[in-house]
Image (cartoon, rainbow, N blue to C red):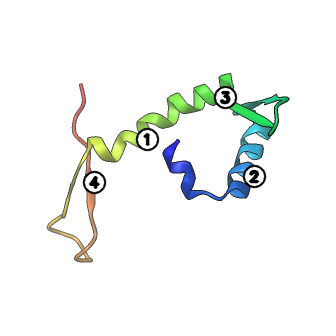
Amino acid sequence: MENLNKISPKALADWLKELEAEGLVKRAMFRETPPRAEYSLTANGLELLKLITPLMKWPVQGEYRKTKHQNKPNQLQFQMKATN
């Protein structure tokens, strides 16, 4: 949640509305002053999270190395570690 301070309130609200419209999050409104809303993942959101989590971890689990046969000096090739 600490990364949310890097996004504007309008951008966050727009993003949450889009996720809600796609059925990935649900919103619970609370009649308080000031008004409060809480968002949680739906079943579809949880399923998507299970699918994308390995993709988010993929660069961390692999090894980056420069290739000997590269065309550009800064081009990197990704080599996955074998996982068993």
- Label for residue 78? 4
- Crowding near the residue tagged with mark 3, few <14, some 14–19, many ≥20 C-alpha atoms within 10 Å: few
Q: Give me the C-alpha separation between circle 1 and circle 4.
A: 14 Å
Write the residue at 46% across / 35% down.
53
- In-front residue for pair 21/27: 27
Q: Give me the C-alpha separation between circle 1 and circle 2.
A: 25 Å
- Number of marks in picture: 4
Give yes or no for contact between labels 4 and 3 (Cβ–Cβ under 8 Å): no
Discs 4/3, front? 3
The residue labelled by disc 3 is 40
Q: Position of residue 72 (x, y in %)?
A: 26, 77
Write the residue at 18% across / 69% down.
69
Q: Residue furthest front?
A: 33
Question: In the image, what residue type sits under mark 3?
Answer: Ser
User: Which quadrant would residue 8 be assigned to in this image?
Assistant: bottom right
The residue labelled by disc 1 is 55
